[in-house]
């Protein structure tokens, strides 16, 4: 039964490919063609041809290889990588179908990938019919490719059905959702677009910026400009939902890329009744918008915010279940007693992190001493957190340097298997809102332990406002510069009559790396 189905598949595929390749073949015959196939440059390396081959030519090429095993898969991959003409890939499928009487799922999947990436959506429809008729189910990789392709066409509603099919097995990716949302927006079906967007958020997925761009560009109109009455979302509801996206960015510390910021600007300026004006700008050092003169939110936490954050960190991180994967209850109690005996610190130093700034393993203690000396010179009360192995004299950890560090700062050394983060958090927050810390660590794991978005946002704000990062190369005995901490909070913010949106195109940023460019949106009164 299975072999009969495969044979039928092969026949149908061969017929389809022969029909589609007919025009291309005629074009080929009009030119003089060198019939000698390219030979591989090296043993086992597949070199794709530069034109469609006949089955006989494919067979000769295959036999010329030292190791022809999985020839069809390797060749299809090579065609994809080299961006080869689609007709060459079609001629390969025809050869495989004629030689073996079947086309494997893997080969069709590779061919599908080539078609989708090349924008050959009409060809994708044919592959969909073949695979649907020949295989009992499709894997998520194939479904994702079909969703991407169908979403670009008038058959986009079938992509919605595919998305619902995936949901029966697992959670679709945010890219799957994004492809279908963009299609719904493009065809004016905003109710479907927003329903899918809500699903995406409810499932805890993070939307792609392209999805937000599509929604900001959407207006409830079809491609032809006709209102889709049955699918329409009121303008006021659509507006409310888009402002909700900006608040989502605020609450999740997300910065739009420039292309998305441009779409946001265009949308605001399209609200003719409200008369918004958008400008590209940057804040003054004192935290004023250079364009409209508005004062940006302070980076400093209020006393209430600080107390709330401190209570949550102490409960959910310091006393949380996973903290003892990084230390022991006894060690943590010892540290708490140590801190209690000391005056409040002005700055807490992640010793191991700071020592490794310049990557020279022979000068770890020298590096740490240089940074601690700079902080002492500023008249600050310093706590250095380290590991006990740092006290064993070695080339990296010179006894003289470590003794000087202990004279200049309060020091607490944990077991070598312990991690510094819980101690750094406790020491900093216990000392008060003025206390800063020196580390390049992102502390993402700890932020994730906090129970709600509002508390995570406070943690992020506290981190941005209190994290000192060494700026540039550090030379022994020289002054150390720290990156300046802006007085304002670099986060999406609104006063009602204005929005200020920091943006840039940084993909994977550190916590202390914030955009310098802003979009100012102000409403004329």
Image: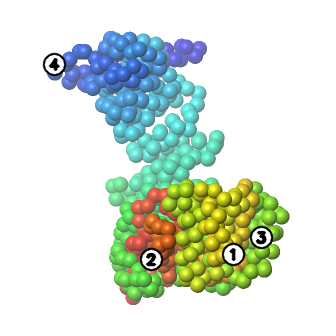
Residue receiving disc 3 = 335
Q: Are marks 3 and 1 in contact (CB under 8 Å)?
A: no
Q: Is residue 5 left or right of residue 333?
A: left
The crowding category of the residue bearing disc 3, from other C-alpha atoms within 10 Å (few below 14, some 14 to 19, many at least 20), is some
Q: Is residue 433 above or below residue 444?
A: below
- The reply to whether the C-beta atoms of the residues labelled 3 and 2 are less than 8 Å apart is no
Residue 80 image position (x, y, % from top left): 38, 33
Q: Which residue is mark 1?
A: 410
Closer-to-camera residue (112/485): 485
* First in sequence: mark 4 vs mark 1: 4
Decide which of tag 3 and tag 4 comes sooner along the chain.
4
Instruction: Identify the image quadrant of residue 28.
Output: top left
Q: Nearer the viewer, mark 3 or mark 4?
A: 3
Residue at (78, 80) in percent of width and height? 341
User: Whole-Å distance between the Cαs marked 3 and 2?
Assistant: 42 Å
The local secondary structure at tag 4 comes to loop
Quick check: 434 left or right of 65? right
- Neighbour tally class for label 2: few under 14, some 14-19, many 20 plus, Cα within 10 Å: many
Label 3 vs label 1, nearer the camera: 1
Query: Residue at 74% of width from left, 80% of height from top?
Result: 342
Image quarter where the N terminus lies is top right
Residue furthest front in the image: 400
Which is more N-terminal, label 1 or label 2?
1
């Amino acid at each position: 039964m299975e072999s009969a189905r495969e044979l039928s598949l092969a026949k149908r595929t061969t017929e389809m490919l022969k029909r589609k390749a007919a025009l291309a073949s005629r074009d080929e015959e009009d030119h003089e063609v060198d019939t000698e196939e390219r030979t591989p440059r090296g043993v086992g390396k597949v070199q794709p041809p530069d034109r469609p081959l006949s089955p006989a030519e494919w067979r000769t090429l295959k036999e010329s290889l030292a190791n022809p095993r999985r020839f069809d898969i390797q060749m299809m991959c090579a065609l994809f990588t080299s961006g080869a003409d689609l007709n060459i890939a079609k001629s390969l499928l025809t050869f495989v179908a004629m030689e073996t009487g079947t086309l494997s799922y893997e080969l069709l999947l590779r061919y599908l990938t080539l078609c989708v990436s090349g924008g050959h959506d009409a060809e994708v429809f044919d592959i969909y019919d073949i695979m649907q008729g020949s295989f009992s189910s499709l894997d998520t990789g194939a479904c994702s490719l079909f969703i991407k392709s169908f979403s670009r066409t008038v058959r986009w509603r079938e992509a919605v059905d595919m998305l619902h099919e995936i949901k029966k097995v697992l959670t679709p990716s945010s890219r799957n959702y994004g492809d279908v949302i963009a299609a719904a927006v493009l065809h004016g079906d905003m109710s479907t677009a927003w329903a899918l967007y809500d699903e995406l958020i409810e499932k805890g997925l993070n939307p792609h910026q392209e999805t937000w761009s599509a929604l900001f560009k959407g207006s409830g109109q079809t491609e032809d400009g006709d209102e889709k009455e049955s699918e329409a979302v009121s303008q006021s509801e659509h507006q409310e939902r888009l402002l909700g996206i900006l608040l989502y960015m605020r609450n999740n510390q997300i910065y739009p890329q420039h292309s998305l910021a441009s779409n946001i600007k265009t949308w605001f300026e399209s609200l003719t009744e409200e008369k918004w004006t958008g400008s590209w700008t940057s804040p003054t050092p004192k935290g004023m918008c250079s364009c409209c003169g508005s004062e940006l939110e302070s980076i400093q936490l209020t006393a209430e915010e600080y107390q709330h954050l401190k209570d949550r960190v102490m409960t959910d991180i310091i006393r949380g279940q996973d903290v003892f994967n990084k230390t022991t209850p006894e060690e943590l109690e010892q540290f708490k007693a140590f801190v209690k005996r000391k005056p409040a610190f002005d700055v807490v130093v992640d010793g191991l992190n700071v020592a490794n700034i310049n990557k020279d393993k022979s000068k770890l203690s020298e590096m740490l001493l240089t940074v601690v000396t700079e902080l002492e010179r500023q008249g600050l009360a310093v706590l250095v957190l380290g590991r006990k192995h740092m006290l064993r004299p070695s080339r990296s950890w010179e006894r003289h340097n470590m003794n000087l560090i202990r004279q200049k700062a309060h020091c607490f050394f944990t077991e070598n298997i312990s991690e510094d983060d819980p101690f750094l958090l406790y020491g900093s927050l216990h000392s008060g809102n003025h206390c800063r810390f020196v580390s390049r660590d992102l502390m993402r794991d700890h932020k994730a332990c906090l129970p709600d978005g509002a508390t995570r946002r406070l943690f992020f704000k506290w981190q941005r406002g209190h994290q000192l990062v060494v700026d540039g190369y550090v030379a022994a005995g020289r002054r150390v510069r720290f990156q300046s901490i802006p007085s304002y909070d670099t986060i999406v913010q609104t006063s009602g009559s204005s929005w200020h949106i920091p943006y840039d195109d940084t993909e994977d940023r550190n916590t202390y790396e914030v955009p310098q460019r802003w979009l100012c949106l102000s409403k004329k009164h």
